[in-house]
Amino acid sequence: MQTEASPYATPSPVQPASSKGTKETVKNALSQWGRKVGEATRKAEDLSRNTWQHLRTAPSIAEAAVGRIAQGTKVLAEGGRDRIFRQAFSSPPDEQLRKSYACYLSTAAGPVMGILYLSTARVAFCSDSPMSYEAGGGDRTEWSYYKVAIPLHRLRAATASASKLNPAEKFIQLVSVDRHEFWFLGFVNYDSAVAHLQEALSSFHNLQA
């Protein structure tokens, strides 16, 4: 093919390709693609399984689904999880939110759906919806969000475990230095929660050592 001479266009000769090299390149590319597809499939299966377990943890699957949608709407309306966290726990300007996870807190009254927050200073939980409790000696009913906040320097351990009868039921146990225990379950992103909680705990204690 001939083209008009142009100072901006120059021909570039093509080097003959090696048949063996081409085959190896294709083979390696397909192998890498296969690994990526396998990893993506595994993550998608884990997310699907965890999401289903998250919904099943609530007394009503329908109410849990509606609750998650409502929480997502609240995040958009309030301007993000960081802002919600700061409002809920009066976070100072130098405290930074690292991660947040949809989950449940196990209580004597049953699992409470909410968000577990991991910041540079603490691990905290706040229920998605206000909960009722008796006040004034039982004369009236009041409503309040269920909150837990453990400063990192008061956190002794973050342990992962699963039910022996149903391995899909996975838990994270948080234990304070004065041996108060909190059990969290129904995580949508369980592995990430375990990894970041344990990393934060280890890093904090290493800095204090």
Image (cartoon, rainbow, N blue to C red):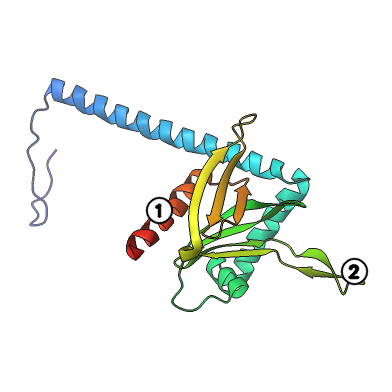
**In this rendering, position of residue 136 left or right of residue 177:** right
Specify the farthest residue to the front. 178
Instruction: Measuring from the top left, give residue 187's x and y in whole percent.
Output: 59, 47
Distance in Å between CA atoms under marks 2 and 1: 43 Å
- Residue type at mark 2 is Gly
Query: Where is mark 2, residue-wise?
Result: 138
Above or below for 148 versus 102: below
- Front-most of residues 188 and 132: 132
Labels 2, 1: front one: 2
Give percent across and percent down for residue 198: 44, 51
Q: Compare marks 2 and 1 and give the one earlier in the sequence.
A: 2
Tell me the quarter of the image containing the C terminus: bottom left
Residue 199, disc = 1
**Image quadrant occupied by the N terminus:** top left
Q: Which quadrant holds residue 17?
A: top left
Residue 169 drawn at (x, y percent): 62, 37
Q: Residues within 10 Å of mark 1 (few under 14, many from 20)?
A: few
Q: Secondary structure at mark 2?
A: loop
In this rendered view, identify the residue nearer to me: 74 or 116: 116
Near-viewer residue (188 or 135): 135
> Is residue 79 visible in the rendered structure shown here?
no
Q: Name the disc covering residue 119, or none.
A: none
Residue visible at 48% across and 38% down? 43
Picture quadrant of residue 53: top right
Query: Dot 2, how many residues are within 10 Å of its Cα: few (below 14), some (14-19), or many (20+)?
Result: few
Q: At 50% from the left edge and 78% from the top edge, which residue is drawn?
A: 92
Is residue 206 shown to the viewer in this render?
Answer: yes
